Amino acid sequence: MTANEAAIRQWNASATRAGMTATARDGDFAKRHLVNPELLRLLGDVRGRLVLDAGCGNGYFSRMLAGRGARVVGIEPAARMVEFAREQGEGVTYHQADLTRLPELGEEFDAVVCSMVLMAIPDWRPAMRACVDALRPGGLFVFAVVHPAFEQLYRSWREHGEYRVREYLVEYEIPGPAATDFHRPLSAYLNELAALGCRLREVAEPGLDPAEVHEPGLTGYVRLPNFLLVSAEKP
């Protein structure tokens, strides 16, 4: 079994119907308040555009895009998530596939969005390459990851009232409640974009509105960015 296959098994095993139902409309708290608004802003007007949601999970963001007039294809390797996403309908076409081995999808895409996925893939470079390859020339690639510099922000702020980190420059595993994530320096993602010939358009590091802070651990989200979003253009 490859490392990617092991990771997919972890995500599939953790995908409970209750959890997917709870996040089916617009994701969890962090997605609603920090990730989704920035993804939508970076993608711009998607009406009539063909968009690939790479690593779509339960399909909530695919459905958000479809609701804004996009023609959406969702790719997700975890069988339980694909099954749930297909049950929701709403005009999205879903395929079960590893992002490193995309199936033939026909047309080239106007945009590819890869939200909170790359840091969960052991062999992530082929996945990023597949996303860029799926674009038409001039197409837009937008991805979001947990910010490499502030991955344990909530836990650290809750325990210490500040952010603490001991290691940054090497790659290492971060065990999570659902599956394992992988720390990589920010430079790894940006340099891979450059190696693929992409033109960087924008880097976003969203902060939480202070009005949304309802517990002490969330204060860190106001002062430091827990998520990193990148927009790039295929040559």
Image (cartoon, helix red, strand yellow):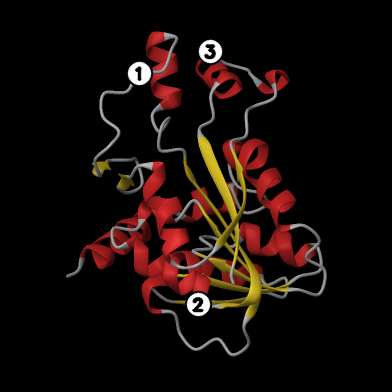
Asked whether, in this view, residue 70 is left or right of residue 156, the answer is right
Asked whether, in this view, residue 223 is left or right of residue 99, the answer is right
Alpha-carbon distance for marks 1 and 3? 16 Å
Alpha-carbon distance for marks 1 and 2? 38 Å
Percent x, y of residue 191:
41, 54
Foreground of the two, 141 or 31: 141
Label 3 SS: helix
Q: Say which amino acid is labelled 1.
A: Arg
Can you identify the residue that label 2 sits on? 133
Neighbours of disc 1 within 10 Å: few (<14), some (14-19), many (20+)? some
Can you identify the residue that label 1 sits on? 164
Percent x, y of residue 182:
31, 47
First in sequence: mark 3 or mark 2? 2
Depicted 130 relative to depicted 119: above or below: below
Q: Residue furthest left?
A: 1
Residue 79 makes an appearance in the image:
no
Q: Say which amino acid is labelled 2.
A: Asp
Can you identify the residue that label 3 sits on? 216
First in sequence: mark 1 or mark 3? 1
Alpha-carbon distance for marks 3 and 2? 43 Å
Quadrant of the rendered structure where residue 138 is? Answer: bottom right
Percent x, y of residue 120:
37, 53
Residue contact at pointers 3 and 2, CB within 8 angstroms: no
Q: Which callout, 1 or 3, points to the residue nearer the camera? A: 1
Residue 184 makes an appearance in the image:
yes
Q: Quadrant of the N terminus?
A: bottom left
Which residue is located at x 29 percent, y 63 percent?
123
Which residue is located at x 41 percent, y 18 percent?
163
Q: Say which amino acid is labelled 3.
A: Pro
Depicted 209 relative to depicted 96: above or below: above
Q: Which callout, 3 or 2, points to the residue nearer the camera? A: 2
